[in-house]
Image (cartoon, grey):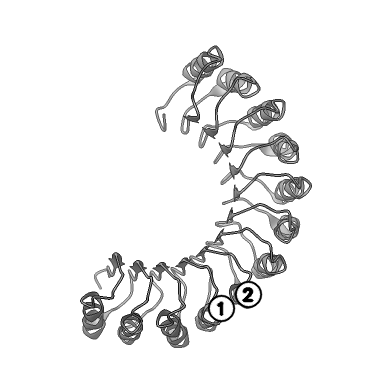
C-alpha cells in the first residue's frame, strides 16, 4: 500500500480489521507515505501488542508519526514477548526523546526479535544515537542484523558508542548504513579501527557515503581491508573526499589480502588519480581479486586510465567483475578501443557496463 495516501480513518480501519482476525496470515504491511494519525497509530499499537499478530515486516516510512506515536508503537512491541516482527521501517518520522527512549527499551529487551531497523532521517541527535548503540550493546542476545542511521547526527558520543558496539564480539550486525551522518575524519577512523579489532565481526555491508574519511580514516580502512579476518562484502564510499593517495592505499590493501571477501566497491565522486589507477589496475589483473561490482562515477579517470584499466581486466581471464560503472569520466578514442577489445574477449565476464559521459 505504498504511497496510497491512506488517511487516519483508513489506517485505523485496516489495523482494526487485522486485529479482529486472530487467524490472519498477513506477514508484511507497508503503510509508507500514509497518514495514520492518532487513531491509526493507536489501532496499530493495539495490533502489535496482540499475541496473535503474525506481522513480520512493518513499513511506516514518511508517515508523519510524532514522538508520542513512535513511543506507543515501540512500547506495544516490547509488551508482546511473542511478537514475530523482524523488520521495522520508521524512516523519516520524528521519534524524539520519548520515542528514542522506547526504542532503546525495545532493543535491550532479550525478547526483541527485530532483525532490520531503519531509522534513516529521524532527526536523532548525539545523545539518542549513543543511547541506541548502548542499548544494543547491553543486549548480548540481540538479533539485529541491519541498522540504518542515515541522515542522523551521531556526534562524538554516538560514534564512540557505535565503535564500542562494532568491536563487541556479541554484535550481530551484518549491515550498517551511515549515509550523510556528518561523521568527521576521527570518527571514521574510530569505526574502522573498531571493526578491525573484532576478528569475529559479522559486518558484511558498510555505507559511509557523504562522510569525510580523511587521511586517518583511509589509513584505518586500508588496515581493515588488508586484514584476513575482514568479512566485508560491500563497501560504499561515495563522495568521501578520498584523494589519490587514499585510493591507492585502499586498492593496495585489497590486493595484499588474497582472502578478501569484498564483492562490491563504490568510490563514486572521489579522486583516483594516477597512482590510484596504477594500484587499481594491479588489483583488477590479480587472479585473487573477487570484485564483482565496481562503481567509479566521476572519479577523474582519463583516456590513458581507461586504457590501463581495460588492459588489466583483459589480462585476467579469471576476473569475476560483472558490473563496471565509469559514467562521467573521459574514455577518449583509445579508451573506447581498449574497452571494445575487452568486450570481444571470450573471457570477459562483464554483464553491465556504464560509460555515459555528459556533453561538453
Q: Residue 358 occupies which quadrant of the picture?
A: bottom left
Mark 1, residue position:
257
* Of 310 and 270, the residue lying toward us: 310
Judging from the image, what secondary structure is the residue with disc 2 in? loop
The N terminus: image quadrant: top left
Can I make out residue 79 in this image? yes
Residue in the image at 70% along x and 37% along y: 103
Q: Residue 116 occupies which quadrant of the picture?
A: top right
- Cα–Cα gap, marks 1 and 2: 7 Å
Position of residue 18 relative to residue 275, above or below, is: above
Can I make out residue 89 in this image? no
Disc on the earlier residue, 1 or 2: 2
> How far across and how far down the image is residue 27, in percent?
50, 29
Residue in the image at 61% along x and 37% along y: 94
Position of residue 58 relative to residue 6, above or below, is: below
Mark 2, residue position:
227
Callout 1 crowding tier (Cα within 10 Å): few <14, some 14–19, many ≥20: some
Judging from the image, what secondary structure is the residue with disc 1 in? loop
Label pair 1/2, CB-CB below 8 angstroms: yes
**Count of picture labels:** 2
Residue in the image at 66% along x and 22% along y: 49
Q: In this rendering, would 324 be left or right of 232?
A: left
Callout 2 crowding tier (Cα within 10 Å): few <14, some 14–19, many ≥20: some
> How far across and how far down the image is residue 81, in percent?
71, 28
The C terminus: image quadrant: bottom left
Amino acid at each position: 500500500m505504498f504511497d496510497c495516501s491512506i488517511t487516519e480513518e483508513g489506517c485505523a480501519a485496516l489495523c482494526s480489521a487485522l486485529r479482529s482476525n486472530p487467524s490472519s496470515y498477513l506477514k508484511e504491511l507497508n503503510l509508507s507515505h500514509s497518514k495514520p494519525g492518532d487513531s491509526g497509530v493507536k489501532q496499530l499499537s493495539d495490533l502489535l501488542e496482540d499475541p496473535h499478530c503474525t506481522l513480520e515486516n512493518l513499513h511506516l516510512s514518511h508517515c508523519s508519526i510524532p514522538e508520542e506515536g513512535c513511543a506507543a508503537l515501540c512500547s506495544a512491541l516490547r509488551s508482546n514477548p511473542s511478537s514475530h516482527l523482524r523488520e521495522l521501517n520508521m524512516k523519516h518520522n520524528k521519534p524524539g526523546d520519548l520515542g528514542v527512549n522506547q526504542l532503546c527499551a525495545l532493543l535491550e529487551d532479550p525478547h526483541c526479535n527485530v532483525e532490520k531497523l531503519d531509522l534513516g532521517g529521524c532527526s536523532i541527535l548525539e545523545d539518542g544515537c549513543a543511547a541506541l548503540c548502548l542499548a544494543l550493546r547491553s543486549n548480548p542476545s540481540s538479533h539485529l542484523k541491519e541498522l540504518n542511521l542515515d541522515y542522523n547526527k551521531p556526534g562524538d558520543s554516538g560514534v564512540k558508542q557505535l565503535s564500542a558496539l562494532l568491536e563487541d564480539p556479541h554484535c550481530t550486525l551484518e549491515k550498517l548504513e551511515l549515509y550523510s551522518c556528518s561523521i568527521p575524519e576521527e570518527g571514521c577512523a574510530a569505526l574502522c579501527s573498531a571493526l578491525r579489532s573484532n576478528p569475529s565481526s559479522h559486518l558484511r555491508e558498510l555505507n559511509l557515503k557523504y562522510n569525510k574519511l580523511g587521511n586517518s580514516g583511509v589509513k584505518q580502512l586500508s588496515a581493515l581491508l588488508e586484514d584476513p579476518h575482514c568479512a566485508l562484502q560491500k563497501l560504499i564510499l561515495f563522495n568521501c573526499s578520498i584523494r589519490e593517495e587514499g585510493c591507492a592505499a585502499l586498492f593496495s590493501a585489497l590486493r595484499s589480502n588474497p582472502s578478501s571477501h569484498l564483492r562490491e566497491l563504490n568510490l563514486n565522486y572521489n579522486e583516483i588519480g594516477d597512482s590510484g589507477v596504477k594500484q587499481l589496475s594491479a588489483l583488477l589483473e590479480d587472479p585473487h581479486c573477487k570484485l564483482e561490482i565496481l562503481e567509479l562515477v566521476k572519479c577523474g579517470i582519463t583516456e590513458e586510465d581507461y586504457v590501463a584499466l581495460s588492459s588489466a581486466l583483459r589480462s585476467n581471464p579469471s576476473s569475476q567483475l560483472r558490473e563496471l560503472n565509469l559514467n562521467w569520466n573521459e574514455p577518449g578514442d583509445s579508451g573506447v578501443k581498449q574497452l571494445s577489445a575487452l568486450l570481444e574477449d571470450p573471457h570477459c565476464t562483464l554483464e553491465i557496463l556504464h560509460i555515459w559521459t555528459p556533453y561538453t
